[in-house]
Image: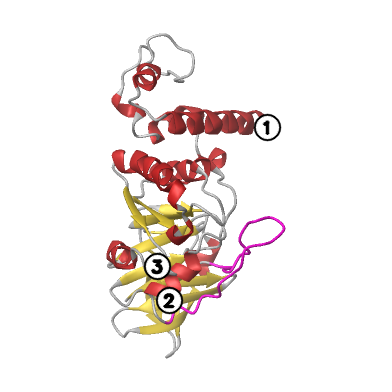
Amino acid sequence: MRGLVVARSGAKIEVWLPESQRLVIGIPRGKLRKSDVRIYCGDWVNVTPVSHNEVAIDSVEERKNILPQPPVANVDKLILIVSWREPDFSNLVLDGMISMAEFFNMPVVIVLNKVDLVGKRELQQVRKVLSIYEGLGYTVLCTSVKRGDGLDSFCEAIKGNLVVLAGPSGVGKSSLLNKVIPGAMLRTGEISERTGRGKHATTEVRLLPNPQGGWVADTPGFQRVDLPRFVSLEALSKLYCEFTQFECEFSDCSHTVEPNCGVLQALKRGEIAEERYQTYLYWREAIRQWSVKG
């Protein structure tokens, strides 16, 4: 019998049984507990019934991917939620999250939430920023829980998949999810007056059933991207998808000072956005410093 791990808090594991449409407690077998195998939300497991409310977890099926922070397995889409105001938009954070998604081979959907807070004078700037990501082939949605903007498109993007909602604290992940999945009952946090950042409304990863099919993982908000923990200097440039189409003289080109660098030449021609290149330089330096400390 197969089951889907939909929640884990400490030693407690909750498993959804598709055949009987029941939620039960999963207890790993002794052999599994003693092994190096970790069990994450999103894992498909093979189970044996122990009682009406409990199953023994015999094994964990092979994963197609895993997002380590937060720990979720078998992700179909990574939904990156940001806002223009409250908290302010940061292309540095967004590009870091996109690079993480690219590194773990997860399709990305970018959601600009709270568009009702965008002023008329800012519209042109917002459109320019979003066009950069649309030009790279990423799906970009604009939503507002307050006005209802883009909610149908958001529902369409997430249905039928196991998706992870990720983004800085305070951008409205929980509020957005409460709106599109009735009964989600996620506690909405507020913006801290002192820091201007969101107070965390969610403290653990849990898969929520989507009434239209699929599952949604709401995750604890985070204020920084730990890209240097996972990505090497050599790998970083390959995660900026626009860089890969340009050839350089040197195979290990850093795209910073080398002669005949295709990326630098494309940057001068305006074929690579200056904003994206600057975040590349930032993350490159962050990774370099991390490697020196490590």
Mark identifier at residue 15:
2
The residue carrying pointer 3 sits among few (fewer than 14), some (14 to 19) or many (20 or more) residues within 10 Å by Cα, namely many
Give the spatial CA distance, label 1 vs label 3. Answer: 36 Å
Image coordinates of residue 98 in percent, x first then y, are: 43, 44
Image coordinates of residue 19 in percent, x first then y, are: 28, 81
Q: Secondary structure at mark 1?
A: helix
Q: Identify residue type, mark 1.
A: Lys
Residue 196 lies within the magenta run: yes
Image coordinates of residue 182 in percent, x first then y, are: 39, 80
Give the spatial CA distance, label 2 vs label 1. Answer: 40 Å
Q: Secondary structure at mark 3?
A: strand
Viewer-closest of 62 and 35: 62
- Asked where in the image residue 64 lies, by quadrant, the reply is bottom left
The residue carrying pointer 2 sits among few (fewer than 14), some (14 to 19) or many (20 or more) residues within 10 Å by Cα, namely many
Mark identifier at residue 293:
1
Instruction: Tell me the magenta residue range.
Output: 183-204
- Give the answer, above or below, for where 79 lies relative to 155: above
On the question of residue 16 being in view, the answer is yes
Image coordinates of residue 202 in percent, x first then y, are: 56, 68
Q: Residue at x 34, y 34 (%)?
A: 241
Q: Identify residue type, mark 2.
A: Val
Residue behind mark 3 = 216
